[in-house]
Image: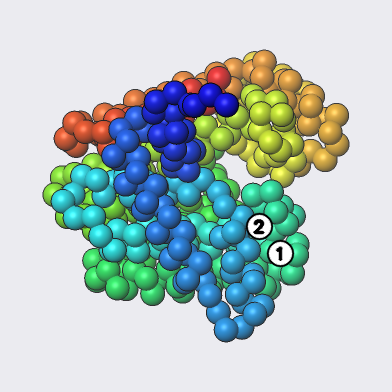
Amino acid sequence: MSSPPPGAARDGAVEDLRVTVGLPIEDEQLLRSVASGLSEVERLLREVVRSDVPAVHEAALHLVEAGGKRFRPLFALLSAQFGPKQGEQVVIAAAAVELVHLATLYHDDVMDEATMRRGAESVNARWDNTVAILTGDFLFAHASRLVADLGTDAARIIAETFGELVTGQMRETVGPGPGVDPVEHYLTVIAQKTGSLIATAGRFGGMMSGADEEQVEALRRFGDIVGTAFQISDDVIDIASPSVELGKAQGTDLREGVRTLPMLYALADPECDPRLRELLAGPIVEDALVGEALGLLRRSSGLERARVTLSDYASRARAELAALPASAARDACESVADYLVARTF
């Protein structure tokens, strides 16, 4: 049996780290630092959700073990690279923002009457809505407990973030009022529901590592913009990508009756196909009608306008990085902004 070429084993290990981290980070030292931090976050998440009550423990651990991108703790760890301190507080902050995110997923599944989450049966489907709501509350409580150990500023910030998340959900539930532009309303909703927590992840990472105030604020703004862009990117992909690439059924938003940015842009076009207007009037149940709506959306002006808006958000996010020193960590942040646009084509 021939020996592997020199460095092959090491290259394989580095590639494994890239898969773990989920970002195209080229700097090996940064890659190892972030991967190590993510490992500590995973350990802490499992420790925190532990309960002496078996039903609580099982339900709380359900989504933790289902995995996910872990982008929020990843961004917190990446943001911590701009400060001189890399310690336990960074890991605690990263775990706290992920707990908040997981808690919102439990509540979202109840509101959406979802049956699946991250390839696993949702808690509300496996148990019931009451268990899902209480489990979400349980995770919110533990996130607050973790953040309390980080100081009063951190506690205030996470409380403000809770407020943004709830306000965004309320805005979405109520819908745009009379005279309110549906597009502006939608962008505000996703900034609050998605951007606010990612902004807090960046802010926490910078704060807990001792980065200077200007850098912390730049990380907060970058996270806010990137978080909104992530949702726009998902909106485009849900329409433009075939099921085999999505790993799930196409047109999820259409089936739920959710009007996303490409749909809103299409409906705002005076030349919008009347049949598309008819289909977008409510949830679409039949697969054939979902396919018809997807075809019309792909040919509409809405999809391209959403891509243009996404590119604008990515450019704005990159501009915020000018306040940060040139480094492998800044390069990694830039790659996130580039990836958001690239993944939609």
Mark-to-mark CA distance, 2 and 1: 7 Å
Residue at the spot of label 2: 109
Residue 265, position in %: x, y? Answer: 57, 26
**Can you say whether 161 is above or below 302 in the image?**
below
Q: Is residue 19 left or right of residue 106?
A: left
Crowding near the residue tagged with mark 1, few <14, some 14–19, many ≥20 C-alpha atoms within 10 Å: many
Residue 23, position in %: x, y? Answer: 43, 35
Q: Is residue 64 left or right of residue 204?
A: right
* CB-based contact (under 8 Å), mark 2 and mark 1: yes
Q: Is residue 70 visible?
A: yes
- Amino acid tagged 2: Asp
Name the residue at the bottom extreme.
52
Q: Quadrant of residue 55?
A: bottom right
Residue at the spot of label 1: 124
Q: Which quarter of the image is occupied by the C terminus?
A: top right
- Front-most of residues 253 and 143: 143
- Front-most of residues 94 and 310: 94
